[in-house]
Image: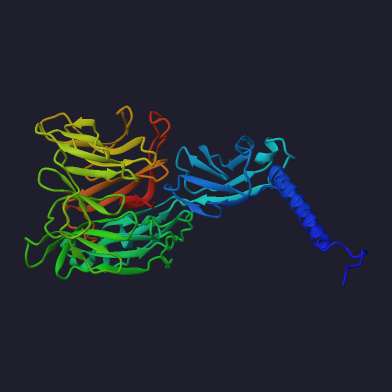
């Protein structure tokens, strides 16, 4: 049967749909292009600030701000403010801006960061102006706090925490223990210490055990990611326990515990131990979290220090220094025959301060890099007791001594700072009439703590003794302000109303 001439074409309806679809696609493409060019109607904003509501320390050297859109760098840098000011350098990677501090942020302060009136990138490129939503956030630095060992009354031999920011003093260890040495954990929430029963004095050093005590400090550090490439999960923070919560870490039943060191990540302890039944069984043991102690077999040695990566040990062996993996029966990674002692490492492990004992009875202080370079910083007829790097690796603070002229051999300690670029030594403070001195530089490098000790040959019921083994009659703590930007500016030390020895700042 023939079609009627009035029948519509068979494909007219689908063709109309095609035309509508094409038109819609063109409109969507045009709108998308316009949005991409103009940046849309919504204002740019800060999506993430890594230090927001966090408590930072000296190791936190840079923060990152992530924006919702590409930004005009110049307007961001012009309008970004930090109160109180923290000078730094800015770098960009796409929508992320990093701000690296020139110097460590002073401890015990609250900071506010603000950003407003900054434009996005498309405003600069000729599109409609889009001003960032005003942004404000707060962060703070850790309290200025340190620990020390008391020497008088009920505080004698006990571990004490003093918070300079809050002006608070807290006894951490129980009265039955005499503390001999201690090392804080990286977040300041716990302290590892060696102590013996008060009833075991004066043989306490041979009976000491290792303990861990909580400080009560609640850390709120910026988010950290596990350094292991296979594990990108945030590092789990330890449980915060009430101040003074004590736990025994290592007993002294079969072995005497001597010198010890704590790794930077807080997961490893190395202890020099000697068997009570076989004096030839002497050497370092490794104690890891949740595992029994394990000897580094075949590795007897002298003074040691765990490297900043927490994986190796620098230990004096014979006529040099060996770098050993923290594994039983492992072969040395390196051997430095020139040096007899390592004093300290920079926080990133790229530099070390080492001592060479010369044949003419002098001592030399060397700066040694992980690239193999060795630079002599000083040569002295006196002693080189300790050294500490500032966080930026520009200055090495030292406790040294010089010989006093005369017929009797006598050394006079002094605090000094060495510019690592020029090797210029600046004497900060002489310490006359001192035999047993300990110093520690604050993590923000604004002050040095040191003690002034009086020893006695008479017995001391408190059991507190100096490095020489003599009883401590009295000791006072001192605070010396320093200006790392101009070390020639001398300050007068301030005596603190705290009788104690071996002060050490919390990180």
The x and y percentages for residue 312 are: 24, 52
Q: In this image, 338 relative to 167: left or right?
A: left
Which residue is outermost to the bottom? 1
Q: Quadrant of residue 452?
A: top left
Q: How is the image coloured?
A: rainbow
Residue 61 visible in image: yes
In-front residue for pair 502/213: 213
Residue reaching furthest to the right: 6
Q: Quadrant of the N terminus?
A: bottom right
Q: Residue 78: where, in percent of width, then height?
A: 62, 35
Judge whether residue 119 can be spotted in this image. no
Q: Is residue 320 above or below residue 249?
A: above
- As drawn, is 155 to the left or to the right of 141? left
Q: Is residue 371 left or right of residue 125?
A: left
In front of the other: 209 or 121: 121
Please provide percent x and percent y for residue 36.
Answer: 69, 46
Residue 126: image quadrant is top right
- Picture quadrant where residue 231 is located: bottom left
| Residue at horizontal 19 percent and vertical 39 percent from the top | 355
């Amino acid at each position: 049967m023939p079609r009627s001439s009035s029948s519509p074409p068979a494909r007219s309806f689908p063709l109309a749909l095609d035309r509508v679809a094409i038109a819609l696609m063109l409109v969507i493409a045009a709108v998308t292009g316009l949005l991409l060019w103009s940046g849309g109607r919504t204002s740019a904003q800060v999506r993430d600030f890594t230090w927001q509501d966090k408590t930072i320390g000296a190791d936190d050297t840079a923060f990152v701000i992530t924006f919702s859109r590409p930004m005009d760098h110049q307007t961001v840098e012009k309008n970004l403010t930090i109160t109180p000011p923290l000078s730094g350098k800015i770098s960009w990677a796409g929508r992320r801006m990093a701000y690296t501090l020139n110097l460590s942020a002073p401890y015990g302060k609250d900071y506010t960061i603000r950003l407003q009136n900054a434009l996005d990138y498309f405003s600069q490129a000729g599109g409609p102006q889009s001003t960032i939503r005003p942004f404000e956030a707060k962060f703070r630095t850790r309290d200025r706090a340190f620990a020390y060992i008391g020497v008088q009354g009920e505080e004698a031999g006990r571990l004490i925490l003093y918070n300079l920011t809050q002006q608070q003093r807290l006894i951490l260890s129980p009265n039955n223990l005499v503390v001999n040495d201690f090392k804080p954990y990286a977040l300041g929430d716990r302290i590892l210490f060696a102590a013996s029963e008060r009833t075991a004095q004066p043989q306490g050093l041979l009976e000491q055990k290792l303990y861990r005590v909580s400080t009560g400090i609640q850390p709120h550090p910026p988010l950290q990611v596990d350094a292991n490439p296979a594990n990108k999960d945030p590092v789990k923070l330890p449980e915060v326990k009430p101040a003074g919560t004590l736990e025994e870490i290592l007993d002294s039943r079969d072995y005497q515990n001597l010198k010890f060191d704590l790794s930077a990540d807080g997961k490893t302890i190395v202890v020099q131990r000697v068997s009570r039944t076989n004096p030839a069984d002497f050497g370092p043991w490794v104690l890891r979290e949740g595992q029994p102690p394990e000897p580094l077999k075949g590795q007897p040695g002298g003074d040691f220090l765990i490297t900043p990566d927490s994986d190796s040990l620098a230990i004096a062996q014979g006529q040099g220094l060996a770098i050993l993996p923290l594994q039983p029966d492992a072969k040395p990674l390196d051997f430095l025959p020139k040096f007899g002692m390592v004093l300290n490492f920079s926080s990133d492990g790229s530099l070390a301060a080492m001592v060479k004992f010369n044949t003419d009875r002098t001592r030399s202080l060397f700066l040694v890099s992980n690239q193999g370079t060795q630079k002599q910083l000083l040569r002295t007829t006196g002693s080189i007791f300790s050294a500490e790097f500032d966080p930026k690796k520009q200055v090495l603070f030292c406790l040294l001594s010089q010989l006093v002229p005369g017929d009797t051999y006598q050394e006079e300690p002094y605090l000094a700072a060495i510019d690592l670029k020029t090797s210029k030594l600046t004497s900060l403070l002489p310490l006359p009439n001192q035999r047993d001195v300990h110093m520690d530089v604050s993590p923000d490098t604004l002050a040095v703590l040191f003690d002034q000790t009086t020893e006695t040959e008479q017995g001391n019921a408190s059991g507190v003794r100096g490095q020489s083994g003599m009883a401590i009659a009295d000791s006072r703590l001192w605070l010396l302000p320093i200006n790392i930007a101009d070390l020639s500016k001398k300050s007068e030390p301030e005596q603190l109303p705290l009788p104690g020895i071996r002060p050490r700042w919390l990180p």
